[in-house]
Image: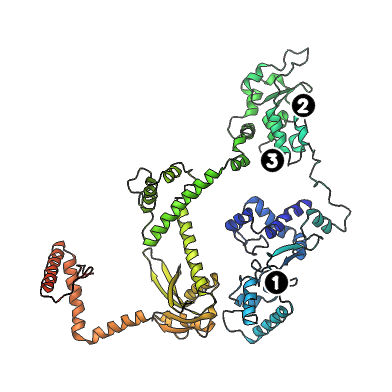
Amino acid sequence: MVNECLLAKWWWRYGSEDRSLWKSILISKYGSASGKWLPFTEDGQQRSKIWGDILHMAVSNTQLYSFYVANCEIQVGNGTRIRFLENHWIGEKCFKEEHLRLFELSLEQEVPLSHLVERKRITSRWDLKFRRRLRVWEELEVVRLMDKLNSNTPCLTEKADALVWKASSNGMFSTAAAYNKLTSGQKKKYPENPPTKSQKIDVKENDIGSLERDPGLRIQIWDYHVNQRDEIQRGYIKAILSQYPKSGSTTHLRSFQLSWFKLFPSWLQYSPTKDAAFCLPCFLFYKPCGSGYDGQQAFTVDGFQNWKKVRDGAKWAFLNHIGKYPNSFHNVAERSCEDWMNQFQHIQKVLDNFTSKQIVDNRLRLKVSIDTIRLLAFRGCVFRGRDERPNSINRGNFLQIVKLLGSYNDNVAKVLDKAPKNASYTSPKIQKEILHIFSTKVKNAIREEIGDAKYCIIVDEARDESKNEKMAIVLRFIDKDGFVREHFFGLIHVSNTAASTLKDGIYFVLSHHNLDIQNIREQGHDGASNMRDEWKGLQALVLNDCPYAYYIHCFAHRLQLALMAASKDVIPIHKFFPKLTFVINIVGVSCKRNDELKVAQAAEIEHIIDIDKLETRMGLNQIGTLQ
């Protein structure tokens, strides 16, 4: 129970340390199915061993999980971190648990509390948005929800939302308090030091130098406290004894030989008390259980005393102890010992040596990549080349521009040449991540420009070169200055062109950016049946959820249809287009015919200019192509 309470403290840290780096990494890697207050993710997701054990404890120990949830209370502050429907900020249950049907119909499942409180301040009522018109029994649910909200209207402050532990007076989670609370009906109380399978030995910092050097008398490494084992291991490694006395039975010629120290200087030790040989690396990294550790007790706990087998040909005991394979227990322990001695590889040393100059160089290197990507994206150019190897003469637009920037600036060239392989910021993955950040910033700017105003959607779908069906979404609205704006807002992949699939894609994009579907005042599509059908088309499905989203056939499509119909009714025009197609095909397949046509066109333009029937100025009368 003590260990489980210790692990449960990570639940508390996850909910209370909102801006910590480790929490941001976990959310980025595994996501979060419970907001930012509980660390639980979607079922079936792959997790690391440690984090998986912490999350699995909610299933293996339901008593602890129920106790934790019952004693955690969200203290309302500014309301930016609290999800209005999903988090427990009023009463013992959240609105999602009490009104599940309303939660499923809501368009604002992840909207923060501060957003709705601000809306209530403006409109003087709780204005909740739903995907469709509510039925009678659903409206009764809304009435009950409104009664609870009106009787518990939150008062927002400037402080951040916080997590409070009700089981303690100071509001902070305590492992000891949780343990004593769960075992209040039992005799055991939480000890000052958490109990383990065996009593651990506590060694003070000034006692490291007085460790027992005799291998036969020293305490086993696993008997020390887990937080002190690192220092104990370093203490033994740094203080290897240099001399050992000879010993052995006077009636027997075999005894421990000093020459063995020269043959195995890195690990062999001798105990005068037990008259036995020991292995230092195996002692430091030996575990009393587990596969691969059988037979190691002779050189770690009991000591090796059978001197007859030391030089027994193929059965040489010391060589058998080392093992034939690189992954034997002794070889693994010896490599671990070498790693402990190399303190420059320690993570703390690496972080301490990360100077401010390296930080500046990394930022400059990243800035070069960002500026290059911004230029290529703005010009609509391709990023990658066919061959991006260092010896290639054309590595693609992105890498070539980065190289060009370095040739004009010595500082840029220096940081690019000395860039580590894991932090060059030029890989295709980094390019996509930076592009995604640009896209997010542009969409957020458009979202802020729209605000809570009404808007229109223009949707069309097409197939790209990779044979994937894409749906483009354009937003049309009036800005704060009264001008009509049209902004491309997203291009998403759809599995098919069914009306329900297109509607789900549109709703996903709009709800992801907190755009209220009830604010749609117009929807513009083409004239295909899946778009304009009166009962099952996309316009009908959207109109059911938003009665003011009137459908308008796209004017560009209507113009195209009108031109096609007019060309069929006017005989000369109807005959003109087939002949034009024939001329284009005849001229386009031959370079000679194309040049002759350009010469004839240039002579015609020159003649018209000479007789003053054609205006001339910069940009006019340029020769183009038939396409």
Which element carries disc 3, helix, strand or loop? Answer: loop
Residue for badge 2: 216
Which element carries disc 2, helix, strand or loop? Answer: loop
Q: Nearer the viewer, mark 3 or mark 2?
A: 2
Picture residue at 44% right of the left edge, 84% below the top: 551
Picture residue at 76% right of the left edge, 51% below the top: 3
Residue type, numbered disc 1: Cys
N-terminal of the two: label 1 or label 3? 1
**Mark 2, other Cα within 10 Å: few <14 / some 14–19 / many ≥20:** many
Q: Are marks 1 and 2 in contact (CB under 8 Å)?
A: no
Q: Position of residue 624 (x, y in %)?
A: 21, 67
Residue for badge 3: 290
What number of labels is visible? 3
Looking at the image, is 278 positioned above or below residue 604? above
- Report the front residue among 175 and 355: 355
Picture residue at 68% right of the left edge, 69% below the top: 87
Which image quadrant is residue 135 in? bottom right
Residue type, numbered disc 2: Gly
Picture residue at 71% right of the left edge, 31% below the top: 235
Residue for badge 1: 94
**Mark 1, other Cα within 10 Å: few <14 / some 14–19 / many ≥20:** some
Mark 1 to mark 2 CA distance (whole Å): 62 Å
Q: With 199 as the anchor, is 393 left or right in this view?
A: left
**Mark 3, other Cα within 10 Å: few <14 / some 14–19 / many ≥20:** few
Q: Where is residue 561 in the image (x, y as percent from the top left)?
A: 31, 82
Q: Position of residue 465 (x, y in %)?
A: 36, 64
Looking at the image, is 89 positioned above or below residue 378? below
